[in-house]
Amino acid sequence: MFFFVACTSSHQWSAVHPSYKKGISSNDAIGIVGTQNAFILSRAKWFSNRLEIPMDSIHQKTDHLIISNFINEFKINYPQASVFPDSVEKDWPTESQKLDKSIFLKGRLPAQGIVISHENKTPPYLFILHEFLIGTDLDRNLYYDYTQGDQELEIKTTVHHITAILSYTLWDNLNQRPLLSSVVEIQEPFSTRLTQEQLKQISQKAVKQIHKEFSRRIIP
Amino acid sequence: MKNILILFLLLFFVVDLSAKETVFKNDYTIWKDADILIWTKDSNLAVSPKELCLSLKRINASIGEPKCRTFGEWERDSVTALYGEWLKNNLGSNLEADHLRARSPEMIKKINNLEDKTVIYLTQKDNQLYVALFEELSASPKTVEILPYSKNQIEQGDIIANALFKNKAERRLTKEERKKKAEEPDPYYKETAKHHSWVGVAYGKTQASLPLTPKSWYKNKLDSRIKSYRNTKDSLSLWNFIEDESPLASIYFGRTWYGFIGAEFFYRYSSHKAKIDHTDPIYEELDYWKFNRHEIGLSLVFSKNYRSFSFLETSPYAFIGFQYSFFNEEIGLKKGVEPSRFYETRVKFENVYKGALFGAGTHLIFFKHYGINLKAGIGSRGRMLDSDPSSEAASEPTIIGGSTIDCFINLGIEYYWSLK
């Protein structure tokens, strides 16, 4: 019975601040923070073989491919967005945000009372990307549910999906509060061949999902 | 003089009716002779410390001699300044305490070091006064109230005092007492006793028919009557011979180990009248005929303890056990009547029946020692199966009461020894 409940339970994967009443519009200025160090590739060898990129540059190349595509897509949806270097978040304290009973999102957030600006730009919102994980057949429960963190991950030889797991916070830069924190999971079906185009599609899907979450006022 | 009195009454009237909104309210302590520190990031102070103190004394008689002052140390400090500014921007309705939590470790440290001082943070927004109350050991405000803003300092003091300091004040503790209290375990976190021993008496009811089961199961047995002191339709169950419904009394003692497994020894008593057929003239000689049932047994108990409140421990359990039943016959003839032949050859029960019982219940233990026990179950008694059947088993007479089953429920009072 408990096993059954444990297996079927669905978690809440985002938290919304009560003051986040209206979704942000595409004309709002957003500072994108954390993109330089957010990318993690798991099963590098598998990707290296499929994409025919040598092992010593697989992390770097996929990082560049996916993140730059992600930023471009983001800027299509929010033209006023600008990328901040990771150096702005150097002094930010690392904190855990609770999304659900056992789901915690860990990441750096700006201090209370300090407005972040870069090159004279002070956007009202910051999009803080904490993690961007790419792998095969991943499940976000295993990464963000602390009750399942100790489970051993079985690497299957047959791959059904390429998975991207992103965690981010939409930050109110002027009042220093997390408006929306979320963990997004994207599953891209995989059959036999993997192309760079497919990886680009994953980041497109991720931006689409984030855009959807931004414009939804209260996320169930 | 009269005018002043009316003015005062009016003032209270206005205060009590004034609109206020409690954003959230968690428990906090109001200390006697309190140290109230007023902290604000606004340019003007909404209430003067002197007026607030006078209001406190007026509104809360138990507060003694409070001391109020502006919290200059925090108004000048850069760490608290950041949090103070942040609070000013972020105080609003529909928030929970966690939304207003101080995140900077230095700020948390400053709040933790408040000891028994109370900080009230004030900020004025659109003709409303937002008040957040801070106490030691909590990074978030204990309570946030949105109060009407008044330019009248006396009225404003009354509004704040009414909203936050109406409850009874507690005596401030000395340094030693504070230290001791800090080391005391939380009432909800006290270790529950691992071993319980108890003794109890219980009273209840026993009957053959199980609730919610069809009557037809028992009809034959319960309708059966004894004819000629020994004949019934069937002799398998004793309920063919005696009344099944009876009050049940019991005494017992038991013990659990590690709050999980336990044993209970019990003695139970009930009295059952023989079911004679009154139409049979043979019974005219009979004055009374009944059987007193004595049962002793031992049951294995599986339980789990829950600390429901600081004074109450609940311990639901299930039990399974065995018992020996003795039926002690009491029979008497009317005065001066010679017993008939049927009387002499009347039915005889076995000396002892062996049986099993199982069921469930719950102990409610109040103040560690006084328990209430509710228990229900099913018990059986039948022939001794631990002797080998003889080779002439077929020709042996049937055993009366080979399978007698009843259910029971009882309520007990108990005394507990709880050993850590």
Image (cartoon, coloured by chain):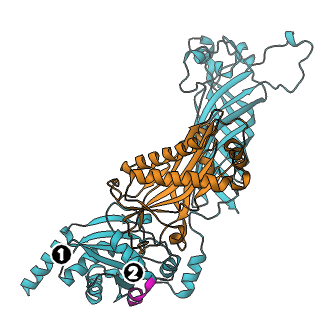
Residue B60, given in percent of the width and then of the height, sits at: 31, 79
Q: Nearer the viewer, residue B234 or B279?
A: B234
Check residue B77 for magenta coloring.
Answer: yes
Q: Is residue B411 above or below residue B58?
A: above
Q: Nearer the viewer, residue B199 or B189?
A: B189
Q: Give the residue at mark 1.
A: B12
What's the magenta region?
B72-78
Contact? badges 1 and 2 (CB < 8 Å): no
- Quadrant of residue B58 in the image? bottom left
Check residue A167 for magenta coloring.
Answer: no
Q: Nearer the viewer, residue B97 or B190?
A: B97
For this view, does B358 lie left or right of residue B372? right
Chain ID, mark 2: B
Image quadrant for the N terminus of chain B?
Answer: bottom left
Label 1: state its secondary structure.
helix
Residue farthest toward the left in the current orientation of the protein? B3
Chain ID, mark 1: B
Q: Give the residue at mark 2.
A: B119
For this view, does B47 lie left or right of residue A179? left
Residue B316, given in percent of the width and then of the height, sits at: 61, 46
Question: Which colour denotes chain B?
Answer: cyan
Q: Amino acid at mark 2?
A: Val
Nearer the viewer's eye, disc 1 or disc 2? 2
- Quadrant of residue B157 in the image? bottom left
State whether residue A101 appears in this view: no
Q: Nearer the viewer, residue A113 or B31?
A: A113
The 10 Å Cα crowd at callout 1, few under 14, some 14 to 19, many 20 or more, is some
- Quadrant of residue B375 in the image? top right
Q: Is residue B34 above or below residue B306?
A: below
Q: Amino acid at mark 1?
A: Phe
